[in-house]
Amino acid sequence: MLSLHQLRCFLATYEHGSLTAAADELGYAQPSVSEQIRTLEKSIGTPLFHRVGRGVVPTTAGESLRPHAERTLAAAADAERAARAVTALETGTVRFGMFGTARLYAGAGLVADVLARHPHVRVELIGQNSTDVQEQLRRGWIEAAMIAVPQVSSEGMQVTPVARDELVYISSDPERVARPVTATRLAAATLVMAETTWRAEDSTRIVLRQMMHETGQNPQTRIEVEDVETAVELVGMGLADSVIPRGAVEALLPRLAPKARWAPLRPRQYDTIAIVHRANATLSPATRLMIELATARIQAISEPIHPRRGAN
């Protein structure tokens, strides 16, 4: 008979491609993980992994089991959270995913909103980039999140757009922001861009690539950094220009680049911000509260997107 413990060992081994690495993640001895995999294979009646060198690769049966194992563990986590929901909203930990840029101008306010209602809870805002947050959702470590949507896979997820944040061009040179910035001008600009680890999936870069598609070019960066704060500081030094969300401009320019100014792109471009959680999930009261407060917070400082009447 399958057990949750066996499925956790299976998924950890699948994701790491190594029994040793899986054991390290789970905090078990490696022989214990191996035994759980063997017992699971015996229950199913077929091997789940092939050994390759010092690692393992999943068999066809292992590939087929993975999504079912993820859903089973996620459902178990939902059940556990539901059972603890009554006390969690008063004295427990409230977790919510939020992508990096949004936390700059909504994160502290969101935490303050939660604590104003429930002063004894512990609050965790999780994530740096939307891709990172989505992985936390997929693995069931958080119930819901606010993320930028261009790169989000909707498979198994309910995605509800709630706001859009205009992307704008910032520079310390007044001439460069005296008029809207076209794709042609953007292609010739010296840019610093944040989120370099996630450059292929970053929502802002995806929007810019789509904008410049007709010119046959991609945005060219001279400087790559992780944090949008660092990008803004470099703009303030006059070393490069950048494209960032309008909300980040209002939060950061006065403090980090007071002489810099901004201009809209032509045509105007936007990051769409959405609330995302697993489809058909039973959300805990704490998560529903976070969704309510995060939506109100982001809609107060960005352009709201309201669901169409009659939409699910």
Image (tube, rainbow, N blue to C red):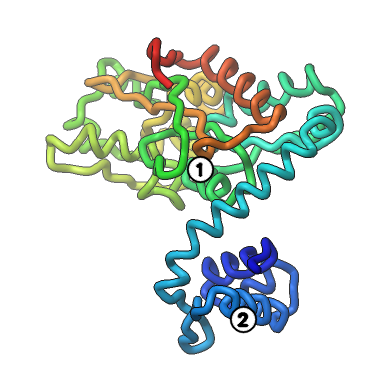
**Amino acid of disc 2:** Arg
Q: Report the side of 113 relative to 189 (left or right).
A: right
> Which quadrant, please, contains the N terminus?
bottom right
Q: Of discs 1 and 2, which sits in the foreground? A: 2
- Residue 24 picture location, percent across and down: 69, 72
The numbered mark at residue 129 is: 1
The residue that appears at 70% across and 83% down in the rendered structure is: 31
- Per the image, label 1 sits on a secondary structure element best described as loop
Instruction: Judge whether 141 appears above or below 61 on screen.
Output: above
Task: Evaluate whether residue 268 shows in this view.
Answer: yes
Between 108 and 243, the one nearer to me in the picture: 108
Between 186 and 42, the one nearer to me in the picture: 42
- Residue 160 picture location, percent across and down: 45, 26
The numbered mark at residue 189 is: none
- Residue designated by label 2: 38
Q: Report the side of 208 relative to 298 (left or right).
A: left
Q: Report the side of 6 relative to 188 (left or right).
A: right
- Residue 219 picture location, percent across and down: 26, 41
Q: Report crowding for label 1: few under 14, some 14 to 19, many 20 or more residues within 10 A (C-alpha).
A: many
Query: Which callout, 1 or 2, points at the residue further toward the start of the chain?
Result: 2
- Residue 197 picture location, percent across and down: 46, 52
- Give the total of numbered labels: 2
> Which quadrant, please, contains the C terminus?
top left
| Alpha carbon distance from label 1 to label 2 | 37 Å
Task: Evaluate whether residue 260 shows in this view.
Answer: no
- Per the image, label 2 sits on a secondary structure element best described as helix
* Residue closest to the far left: 215
The residue that appears at 29% across and 16% down in the rendered structure is: 178
**Amino acid of disc 1:** Asn
The residue that appears at 13% across and 42% down in the rendered structure is: 216
Within the image, what quadrant is residue 8 found in? Answer: bottom right
